[in-house]
Image (cartoon, rainbow, N blue to C red):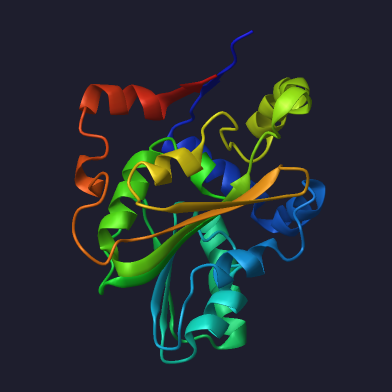
């Protein structure tokens, strides 16, 4: 049997996340998110004091503590999200902790332009919710400095028979909660533009962290700007993913 996922438009996604902003900690528990997964994802960015990092789909700011600790007070943390409800929670958290170097923006990740080259980019439980994930990834990669890391942390359908067995339920659950497409393979899309892509799976292969370093020199197997140069194919790919 072939399963398909019909992506929602931006307004639908934004409205859904506005409604669930108060319950994000509950969803971490509901989906059995490993308690150290956020910390590990930030650690894989390899950030130093004074660095600049972007989190795309920052939500309510549940990674801010780790990001702020990594770059210190002299660094810069940029967070973007399309949900004003999620960002309101993120601003409240930022202001409560006096993290003055965290700048938040309500915008599409494919449209965000960082004010400086980025030392790291993080997608944390957000990549699969973006219908145009490839465009967002391409924009982020272009703004990452050579030697910087891009990290995607998210959930996935486990491998093998168990994964095939729970796939219908996963599609139903995502449709009614987080709107994350369980059929796409972000680690493959990252590998398409990066020389080396590392993958670390957790909790019976249902969660993963993948990361790639932008090459220090130009070139590599595929340049980001050329990774998906067929517009017709790209448009179809980001509308519907099928397996």
Residue at point 64%, 64% (across, down): 38
Rendered position, 14 above or below 87: above
Q: Quadrant of the C terminus?
A: top right
Q: Nearer the viewer, residue 224 or 177?
A: 224
Say which residue appears at 51% left-offset and 32% top-offset: 184
Looking at the picture, tell me which residue is in the foreground, 196 or 233: 196
Res 148 quadrant in image? bottom left
Q: Is residue 235 above or below residue 131?
A: above
Q: Is residue 68 above or below residue 29?
A: below
Q: Residue furthest top?
A: 1
Q: Is residue 111 visible?
A: no
Q: Quadrant of the N terminus?
A: top right
Occupied quadrant, residue 61: bottom right
Q: Position of residue 209 (x, y in %)?
A: 59, 54
> From this viewpoint, is residue 52 visible?
yes
Q: Position of residue 99 (x, y in %)?
A: 52, 85
């Amino acid at each position: 049997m072939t399963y398909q996922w019909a992506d929602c438009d931006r307004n639908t996604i934004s409205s859904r996340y506005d409604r669930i902003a108060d319950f994000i900690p509950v969803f971490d528990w509901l989906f059995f998110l490993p308690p150290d997964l956020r910390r590990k994802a930030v650690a894989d960015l390899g950030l130093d004091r004074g660095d600049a990092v972007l989190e795309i789909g920052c939500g309510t700011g549940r990674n801010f503590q780790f990001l702020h600790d990594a770059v210190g007070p002299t660094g810069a943390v940029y967070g973007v999200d399309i949900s004003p409800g999620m960002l309101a929670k993120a601003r409240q958290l930022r202001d409560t902790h006096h993290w003055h170097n965290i700048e938040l923006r309500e915008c599409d990740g494919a449209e965000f332009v960082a004010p400086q080259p980025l030392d790291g980019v993080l997608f944390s439980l957000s990549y699969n919710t973006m219908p145009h994930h490839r465009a967002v990834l391409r924009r982020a990669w272009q703004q990452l400095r050579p030697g910087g890391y891009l990290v995607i942390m998210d959930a996935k359908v486990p491998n093998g028979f168990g994964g095939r067995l729970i796939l219908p339920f996963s599609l139903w659950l995502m449709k009614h909660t987080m709107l994350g497409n369980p059929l796409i393979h972000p680690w493959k899309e990252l590998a398409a533009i990066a020389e080396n892509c590392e993958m670390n799976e957790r909790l019976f292969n249902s969660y993963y962290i993948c990361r790639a370093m932008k090459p220090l020199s130009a070139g590599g197997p595929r340049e980001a700007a050329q990774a998906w140069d067929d517009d017709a194919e790209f448009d179809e790919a980001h509308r519907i993913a099928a397996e």
